[in-house]
Image (cartoon, rainbow, N blue to C red):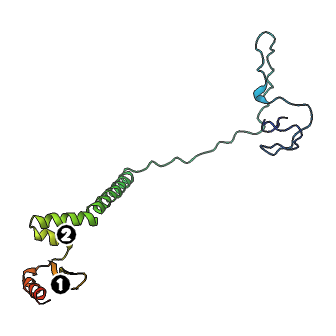
Amino acid sequence: MFCQACGSRNRDDAVFCENCGARLDKGEPEIPVQAQTPPVYGAQMQPMPVPPVPPASAPIETVYVKPVKPVEKWLILFIAEVAAAVLALIFLFHNAAKLFEASKIGERYFVAAANGDWREAYRMLEVEESGFIKLVFEAHSRMLIGAQMICPRATDMIGELATAIANG
């Protein structure tokens, strides 16, 4: 049995359509629209009469629509400038994030240190005024065995560290 509403096939004992839920008629079985054979065109076809169009009962009302103002050129330019500025900021922040990653800063620091360019190395670490010192101790005896210094006055501290290493 086919549904009269959606044309889907249902069981013969169904009361409602399984697809759309419409009530199924138990009358004569209908063939779905897809399965119908198209009419044969030719000499046996009669033209259908066209019903006359009734005259309009009410006069046609004229509706006036307010014309739309064109967008001014300065507004288009302003929107284009704002869009360009936003895209430029996105591009700059994206590239700046890549440029200032910790791995990139470390790489540039070690390249500068290997080349002896300590000013650039300090600039990478932002320690020109304060600096830092890393002390290296032996694990089992906890004795000072070395140090790494990055500061503006590291040469003044080498003697102090050498004394500390010698005296344990």
* Residue position for label 2: 124
Sequence-earlier tag: 2 or 1: 2
List the single residue furthest toward the bottom.
167
Counting from the top left corner in percent of width and height, residue 76 is at: 38, 51
Q: Amino acid at mark 1?
A: Leu
Quadrant for the C terminus, please: bottom left
List the single residue furthest toward the top.
43
The dot on residue 156 is none
The reply to whether residue 40 is in sight is: yes
166 and 30: which one is in front?
166
Above or below, 153 relative to 27: below
* Residue position for label 1: 144
Above or below, 168 relative to 20: below
Distance from disc 2 to disc 1, alpha carbons, whole Å, reads: 28 Å
29 and 164: which one is in front?
164
Q: Which residue is painted at 32% across and 59% down in the image?
A: 94
Q: Answer few, some or many: residues within 10 Å of disc 1's Cα (few below 14, many 20 plus, some between 14 and 19).
A: some
